[in-house]
Amino acid sequence: MQDIYEMMHTLDNPIKNTDTYLNKPVFALISEIAADKNLRCYVIGGYVRDCFLKRSSNDIDVVVEGSGIEVSECLAVRLNTDVHVFKNFGTAMLHYHGMEIEFVGARKESYRANSRKPIVEDGTLEDDQKRRDFTINALAFSLNERDFGHLVDPFDGISDLQQKLIRTPLDPDITFSDDPLRMIRAIRFAAQLNFHIVDEAIQAIGRNRHRIGIVSKERIVDELHKILLSPRPSIGFKLLDKTGLLEIIFSQLHALKGVETSEGRQHKDNFYHTLKVVDNIAKTSDNLWLRWAALLHDIAKPSTKRYDPQTGWTFHGHEFLGAKMIPSIFKHLKLPLNEKMKYVQKLVLLHMRPIALSQEVTDSAVRRLLFDAGDELEDLMMLCEADITSKNEETVRKHLNNFQLVRQKLKEIEEKDAVRNFQPPVSGELIMETYGIGQSREVGLIKNAIKEAILDGVIHNNFDEACRFMKEEAKKLGLIEKNGE
Ligand code: ATP
Ligand code: MG
């Protein structure tokens, strides 16, 4: 065992201010309670790892050789706060000053083939460390008076932290087969921390990949979110692909892989292109759903791919088909089928529009884009800029300049015509009232004609012009005003 303060200085990146980590008063309190009860307590897992990585962390896991619930209840009394006890799991959780502190009794686990749920017995700290997923997640600090602050590191996790390695404490085939979620966790940590998964572990993931079938979709998607939110999500998706997991958990994304050649002409590999777009968007936005839109923007390319001897490879309509595929993909992955899905769908549907505009900018096309994109216009422009993945710097600059012009034009037209999110100046109620009719096809036709006329610039976006236009349209439909005109 080594002293934490010593250890911290042996790392590349020593922690300068240890006060913020183990000197929180709550640790001293736990230490007192442990001494009173003659139990041993340790901080373990992510919090300890993140101390060394200088990542901020408010989740504290405490493992107790004995009853975690008992210690948590004493601590709650001392802190005058509530504790939530989960008797079935032998765990307890309390919130204090923005920290989430979870207590668990040290346990020994054994697994069955068809379930992630282990058979659990009381155990020692060492037993508990063995059931952890990675050596860097098995580090523990003692909270005991006798050796407060000592690091307990039976698997040399510190050296793996230094070398940026993800390694399992036991034989990786056992660790991954016991709980297959750990395979995706390994990949998620590799992406989040920019760490390398050791070869034996990569091989073991490949061998155990089909075990992912016993993990719930919700847990898988939680990890996919974390991969997407990492600084370079491509690291995670490439590893999912390399280990064979991607094909199992997300076949549509896997289908983007590959290059076909016809008459000596190749199209680009849409999988790697997509990952580049996601990495690009990760540099400019933290919005998880915008990152999902980037991941899915070309999802229909495999099904729309055609070869035309004149123009080469085409993917006509992939944005329409892609938008159509979003609900089933969301349903399959158990992603929320709510406004987040609609947002992703809208961006996938519109992602080719600014590109088309950058080739030929007409006022009416700009108005239509403003109207269709509404509040999502800025995100759409960001997605389109991220979609430029050419290796040729000149080409990239040219496209970015074009988008600058599109942005300028969008701004000018919006200032002039205010069509973004516009409400039709003539309502359906007014049409019904004027012509003494109920909900009908005619009302829809007139409303739509007014909208189109505004977007095409035939009339301005105001009540008087829209009203005049309504009358012309109604006449064409043979409608007569209630007051006889
Ligand atoms: P983060 O909170 O950033 O997701 P973390 O490492 O703290 O990372 P948690 O899910 O909060 O992850 O788990 C806390 C600790 O519990 C981990 O550090 C690890 O020791 C252990 N752990 C979590 N999930 C597993 C698992 N599936 N198998 C084994 N150990 C696990
Ligand atoms: Mg955590």
Image: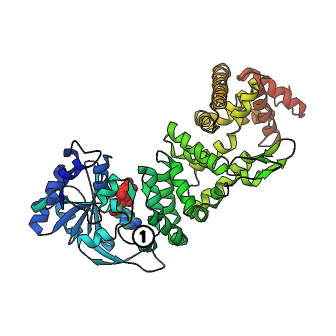
Instruction: Name the residue rendered at 58%, 44% in the picture.
Output: 276
Q: Quadrant of ligand 1?
A: bottom left
Q: What element carries label 1?
A: helix
Question: Is there any visible trace of residue 411 in the rendered image?
Answer: yes
Query: CB of residue at label 1: within 8 Å of ligand 1?
Result: no
Q: What x and y, as percent, mark residue 241?
A: 57, 59
Provide the residue designation for mark 1: 172
Position of 218 with respect to 48 (left or right) is: right
How has the structure been colored for display? rainbow
Vertical comparison of 35 with 265: above or below: below
Q: Residue at x 62, y 37 (%)?
A: 380
Quadrant the N terminus occupies: bottom left
The one nearer the camera, 52 or 81, is 52
Please state the horizontal and vertical placement of residue 461, each as a whole percent of the image: 71, 23
Looking at the image, which is closer to me, 286 or 415?
A: 286
> On the image, which quarter does residue 474 sit in?
top right
- Left or right: 476 with respect to 59? right
Asked where in the image residue 237 lies, by quadrant, the reply is bottom right
**Position of residue 71 measured from the top left corner of the image (x, y, whole percent):** 19, 65
Q: What residue type is labelled 1?
A: Pro
Left or right, 309 with reference to 89: right
Residue 71 drawn above or below residue 5: below
* Relative to 120, residue 164 above or below: above
How many numbered discs sit on the rendered protein? Answer: 1
Report the front residue among 81 and 335: 335
Q: Where is residue 18 in the image (x, y as percent from the top left)?
A: 20, 46
Q: Quadrant of the C terminus?
A: top right
Mark 1 surroundings: few (<14), some (14-19) or many (≥20) residues within 10 A = many
Return the residue nearer the eye: 380 or 255: 255
Question: Can residue 57 be spotted in the picture?
Answer: no
- What's the residue at 30%, 65% (across, down)? 155
Residue at figure coordinates x 54%, y 59% from the top left: 240
